[in-house]
Amino acid sequence: MKIIVCIKQVPDTVDVKIDPKTGNLIREGLPVIINPDDKAGIEAALAIKEQTGATIQVVSMGPPQADVALREALAMGCDEAVLISAREFGGSDTYATSGIIAAAIRKLGMPEILITGRQAIDGDTAQVGPQIGEKLHIPQVSYVEEIQEVTADHLIVKRQFEDGYHIIKIKTPCLLTAIGELAKPRYMTVSGIVEAYNKEIKVLGFEELKDDLELDMIGTKGSPTNVYQSFPKQLKAPGTVLKDMSDDELVAAIMAKLEEKHVI
């Protein structure tokens, strides 16, 4: 059995800056991590590997420095790493990105299980995973919080759904988008780190993928999404703390504040 996990290297800070001209995030100088939902997907794949002997390829699209995230995945226990990187791919939106990643997966060979994170913390669109599934023409389940059964021809998964959940049986090959609750990622081991930096990371660039791409739908110019406005998260004002009051006084104070805000 073969598993491919798609990951993204994202900024690990709330102190972000936005390019006023393009509306894009300025990434230079920011500390980076593996996107949390993607890391839960890695752990889920590793658990399946331990059960079935599957092999895991971890794939990331980004600049050359994204190999740091790939080596972390290798140090956790993934078998192979692939970096999708080319200047022609820079500035791709979710539609363009999913097309490039889908082409890379076809190049690598279709796995039985393809796992992506639900969404990246630097974009929060939750679009790339499902778009990859559509472009590969395989069934998919989003918001997976538990993998209950794994066989060669199907999976049974638990999908988070508003205030409930779905239990879904899905044929392989298939795509799953992982949420953080799916698995708690393990730590890298010392031996794993040493082995990770001795492994070669395969690079797929424009020349390797161009024959399977919509060439007018890659990069900034080929992205149908236009950024209207971007802004960093705004900190909320601190709340009011009520101290040294009786229960009746607390109730009266809360009711007064609700009336002031026209809540009641």
Image (cartoon, rainbow, N blue to C red):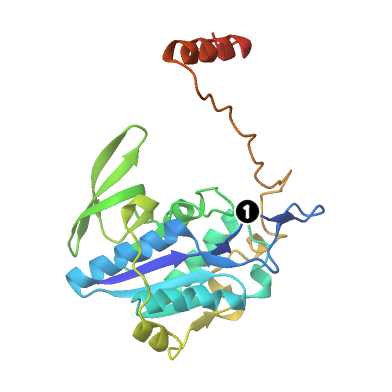
Above or below residue 79? Residue 262 is: above
Q: Is residue 123 visible?
A: yes
Above or below residue 225? Residue 221 is: below
Classed neighbour count for the residue bearing mark 1: other residues with Cα under 10 Å, few (<14), some (14–19), many (≥20): few
Above or below residue 111? Residue 154 is: above
Type of amino acid under label 1: Val
Above or below residue 93? Residue 112 is: below
Name which residue lies at 37% across and 59% down: 40
Q: Point out residue 33 in the picture as x, y percentages from the top left corner.
A: 52, 66
Q: Quadrant of the N terminus?
A: bottom left
Say whether residue 129 is left or right of residue 32: left
Q: Point out residue 200 in the picture as x, y percentages from the top left corner.
A: 46, 88
Name which residue lies at 44% across and 65% down: 6
Say whether residue 29 is left or right of residue 7: right
Q: Name the foreground residue: 119 vs 108.
A: 119
Name which residue lies at 50% across and 49% down: 126
- Residue 260, by quadrant, is top right
Q: Point out residue 79 in the picture as x, y percentages from the top left corner.
A: 35, 80
- Residue 24, by quadrant, is bottom right
Numbered-mark total? 1
Q: Name the foreground residue: 188 vs 36.
A: 188
Name which residue lies at 82% across and 54% down: 21
Say whether residue 17 is left or right of residue 46: right
Q: Quadrant of the C terminus?
A: top right
Q: Is residue 141 visible?
A: no
Q: Point out residue 235 in the picture as x, y percentages from the top left corner.
A: 65, 41
Q: Name the foreground residue: 179 vs 218.
A: 179
Q: Name the foreground residue: 104 vs 254.
A: 254
Say whether residue 215 is left or right of residue 44: right
Secondary structure beneath label 1: loop
Q: Which residue is mark 1?
A: 14
